[in-house]
Structures are given as C-alpha cells and as structure tokens.
Amino acid sequence: MSDVIQLLPDAIANQIAAGEVVQRPASALKELLENAVDAGSKKIQVMVKEAGKMLIQVIDDGKGMSMTDARMSFERHATSKIRASADLFAIRTFGFRGEALASIAAVAQVDMKTRTTEAELGSHICIEGSEVKKQELTTCPVGTSIAVKNLFFNVPARRNFLKSNAVEMRHIVDEFQRVALSYPEIAFTLYQNDMELFNLTPGKLSQRIVGLLGKAYQGQLVACEENTPLLNIKGYVGKPEQAKKTRGEQFFFVNNRYIKSNYLHHAVLSAFEGLISSDQHPFYVLFLDIDPVHIDINVHPTKTEIKFDDERTIYGLVRSAVKQSLGAHNVVPTLDFSFDVNFAENWKNDEAKKQEVSRENSYKTFSTPTFKKPDPTGWEKLFEGNNSAVELDRLDRSHAEDDTELLTFSSKANTSDKKEPVSNPGETEDTGATFQVGLAYVVAQMSSGMLILDQQASHERILYEKFKRQLENSSGASQQCLFPQNIDLSPADFSLVMDLKEELTNLGFLVAEFGQNAVLINGVPADITINNEKALFEALLEQYKHFKSELSLDRKENLARSLAKKSSLKRGTKLNSREMETLVGQLFACQNPNYGLSGNKTFIKLDTNKISGFFS
Ligand code: ADP
Ligand code: MG
C-alpha cells in the first residue's frame, strides 16, 4: 500500500485554523483592533457594514509595516511579538500566535494599506482566500488600514451560520467595548453603515466608561484600588443600588486583556453579599495587573480564558479589594429609591432651590476661606466616609477632605408657623420609597428589605460628624444674623466663651465681646435651622458644661456633640420625602452611621427573611 499522508496545502490549513480564530465578524474585529493597539496607535477608527458581514475596516495610526512585513503578516505563525518559547511566558501584547491575519485572509477578501514613518511609500496588498491578488506600492498615511470584506465568502456553510445583523452587531459592539475600555488613552470611533455609534476621546477610565455605557454611570462608580506584591487591582465597581437583573456589564481585564472568569466574578459577587439581592449583577470594570509568569493565557484560541497559578489568593484579593471599596465594613445598606438613577440630577436642582430659599430669607451667607461650595452629587455621598466614591470630573481635584454642606431641615419641630420645606410641595411628595412613622422614624426600602431610621439620632450623628470635620478643618460657614443678638453671661460663662472663641468661629458662630460679661452674636452656623439664635447659643453652653463635667470630653469633641444635640432635627418634626431620603443618604455617608451620640442605634435593618419570619 502506498503512503497516504500528505501535508495540507497552506490555504486549507489556514481555513481550518480560521475556524478557531474567526467565528464571526466580531472575532475578526477583535484581532484587528488588538493588532492596532499592539502597533502603538493613538487613534483607531472602525467601520462596519451589515454588522461586519460585508465590511470590517480598522484604520490605525500606529507604526505600520514595511513592504516585507506587510506580506509576511499574512503567513501563518508569522508574528513580530514572540521569538522564542520563553517569550510565551512573558506576554504583554495582545497577539502572539501570529495566526490572526492568516486566518482572516483565508476566509475573506482582505485589502490592506500600511506605511511606516521611515518609508515614503506604503504597501497595498489584496488577498482573497489566502491568495495574493495584488501587491504594490501606494501612497497612504502612516499606520495601517485593513478592510475585511465578505467574510466567509468561500465558506458558505459558515456564512449561513451567522446570526441576524442585530445579533452580530451586538457581538461587534461587545468586542469594541472591551478594547476601548482597556485603552482609555486611545481615541476610538465606531461607524455602522456610515452612522456614528461611538466617538471616544482619549481620557480617564471613568470617562471612557461613561462614553461607552452612558451618562447613567456618572456618579455611580466607586473606585477600587489595591496594590499587593502579587497583584495590582484597579478600576471601578458600580454602586450596589445600581446593580441590574441582567448580566452584561462586568469586565475583567488581566494585563489589559479582557477575560472571562466565573471564578473571579464570584469573588466580586461575594464582596457585594448583603448589598444586592442574589438575582442582581453589579457593574464592574476591574483591571488586574500581574506578572505574566503567574498566568497562562494560552489555554483557548480566542484567549478570553485564563489560568492563574494561585487562583485562591487572587480570589481573596479581588474580593477584599471590592469589599473595601464598598466600605462593607461600614454596613452600607442598599437603598432602593424609585428615582435613584437620576438622583444626582435631582439633588443638584434641590441644591439650587435651597440656595434661592436662603437668599429669600435674606440671610447673608459668607464663608471662611477654606469653606468649599457645596457640590453634592448624589449617591457617592453614601460612600464618602471611605473616600472611595468618586465623581468623574472630580477625579483630578484633590479634595480628600471635602466639606459638603448638609441639607438644612427647614421644617420646624412642632411649631405652628409651618414654613414650607425647601423643595416644592407636591413635586417630591410620595415617591413611595420612604415614609415617616409617628413623626419620629423614617422607613426606607432597600433591595433586601427595609431600614428604619430614628430621625433624631440619625440627624445628631450626621451633624456631629460634620461639626467635627469643620472643627478640624476650620471650615464652618456662617449665616449673618438679621438682628445681632446680645447675650448677658455670668463671668464664668463669659470666660468660657472667650476661651472657646476660636472653635466657635470654626463652627460658624460669629461672637464679639460686647461690654462686661456680654457678647454679641453676629452670625450662626450656616447650615442648621435656627429659630432663635440666642436660645441655641445658651443651650449650647449648657450642654457643653454638662458634657464637660459628665464625660470630660476634649473641647472639639464636646462642642461638636453639644451643637449636634442642640441643633438636630427633633422627634415630632414632619419631613417631606426629599428630606427623608437626604437624611438616609447622609447617615450612610457618615464614618460611623450605626450609632447615635448616646450610643443608641440610629437605624435597624429588617431583611425580607426576617419579615417573612414574622409570618411563619
Ligand atoms: P499576532 O498579532 O499574533 O502577532 P497577527 O496575524 O495578528 O499575529 O499579525 C501578524 C503580524 O503582523 C503582527 O505580529 C505584526 O507584526 C503585524 N501587524 C498586524 N497588524 C498590524 C497593524 N495594524 N500595525 C502594525 N503591524 C501589524
Ligand atoms: Mg494579532
């Protein structure tokens, strides 16, 4: 019997390999994008027609190829990226198998123009089904433009296997997103049938996320960062209340390569435990940077799977990094306000209204030099205690100790002259998510049950932490009294006031000596509601003296506590829904939201489980 084994012709071998590398238009796009990134491009343009079935074109401004390289690039196992097997373990570039272009050219009509900076003329190569149809010199810009036309034109079975344009386009966008996310410093555009889908300018990761996924992500990102000798983790997770029922916006990158890992996904989920319900999926974009010796990415041709040599440690690190960024140790419940996506907007409007209101009240608000303008931006306040939440345009600004103005509770406790609350009545009423019980407790929904806040204890905690900060930073603002108040004091109290003058000023009290044992109150803290400045000041002094003898607190601690106690919202005060929601938000922005000033609880949680327990 004669010998029967023959080597396959290259064209057929390439077609077989193509079956692994190029499953659909999106996989071709992925390879082209990765090559463009590997070439050091600053700007990458993508054009597709008929969801990539008719055309996928990628134009980059990278280093381009010489005439010989241009031809070589279509040979199988032709790569400039690894030279020896040792390099396989130090892979930092996307490509390394040297089979993408060969595979694509085996199953499509490829038209490539490329030029290096040194060369005056570029190369133009046309290949159809592995057959070189044209190779000539051409004029073209530096960089590479590759057009892949009529994918699978010579493999009808595969072409028929492609899904609808909508489905294939979804895959294209997915691949585009993954690459664009991992290179926010590169500009990307994506056109479909001449329509612009994305136009991404170079910027920071957070801006790229918003550019790709939409404005709803603004103010919803919690920064995550952890550096260890084995692994660095960087990126963002979405706030728990933003988690969705459908998966899809979870991105892991290892050394900037998108990977899928159920194991690591689980690590993130476990960090969200208790914060979202089990059928929800949190958003995340996490970049793991690890020495390539610890990973093997060569386990699958499309390279989205990965093996770590020490999976368990990596699991633990990812979990703790995310947990930390969520401030899970701080008991941050998930709140389920009906308008949470637009909350940042609403808050801003509210802030504007509030400022108008204070002008109408003819307060003259002026500030000490260190006082920053309030710029509350929504739910990141929930996390501000940990300084882990960021808002996009605030990333640059160094404001670790940002002193944000708190909402003024303008409803008065039990008083008859009911002034309308800051927001328009009716407009914010009854979002259904929060309500008040017995004019003393605020009930808020969270995804896993509900929260019941003691409004007075909570507000005391909020104010206390705020005053504490102001005292540390000398950052309290004042509102000028309409009629300066003259207060006669005992000699002991007078000297106490003089002694505390600096701290009082830091809180926003403008106190001047006014003859023997008398002071004039010209201004009071800007952001508390005061009916009677004189009464507040006297009460503050009494409380201070009381705490001093009882608890021997240091002066700042004592002042912050005393003022918080005396100026807080009391039981019996009616709150509108905006005020309730702000109260909840501000409480969980506290460093220590769990306890009030006398060690009493500020809130309790009733999980759905617990509630159902009541009925069984
Ligand atoms: P790999 O990326 O795995 O090396 P490819 O088949 O994707 O294999 O590409 C082969 C080679 O062609 C690359 O190693 C690179 O040298 C060159 N190449 C491909 N695309 C580009 C591009 N857009 N710019 C510059 N060089 C490119
Ligand atoms: Mg490649």
Image (cartoon, helix red, strand yellow):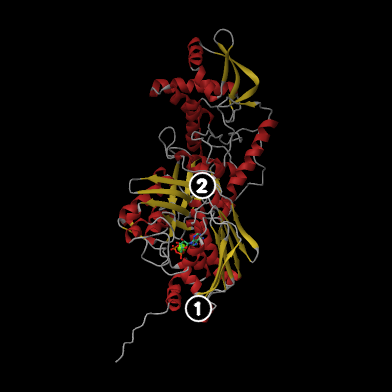
Judged left or right of residue 35, residue 377 is right
Q: Position of residue 368 (x, y in %)?
A: 58, 24
Q: Quadrant of the C terminus?
A: bottom left
Q: Secondary structure at mark 1?
A: helix
Q: Which residue is mark 2?
A: 443
Q: Earlier in the sequence, mark 2 or mark 1?
A: 1
Q: Secondary structure at mark 2?
A: strand
**The one of 324 and 54 positioned closer to us in this rendering:** 54
Give amino acid for label 1: Arg
Label 1 within 8 A of ligand 1 by Cβ:
no
Q: Which residue is mark 1?
A: 158
Give the residue at x 56% y 7%. 516
Judged left or right of residue 30, residue 2 is left
Residue 146 can be seen, yes or no: no
Give amino acid for label 2: Val
Give the residue at x 44% y 37%. 591
**The one of 174 and 452 positioned closer to us in this rendering:** 174
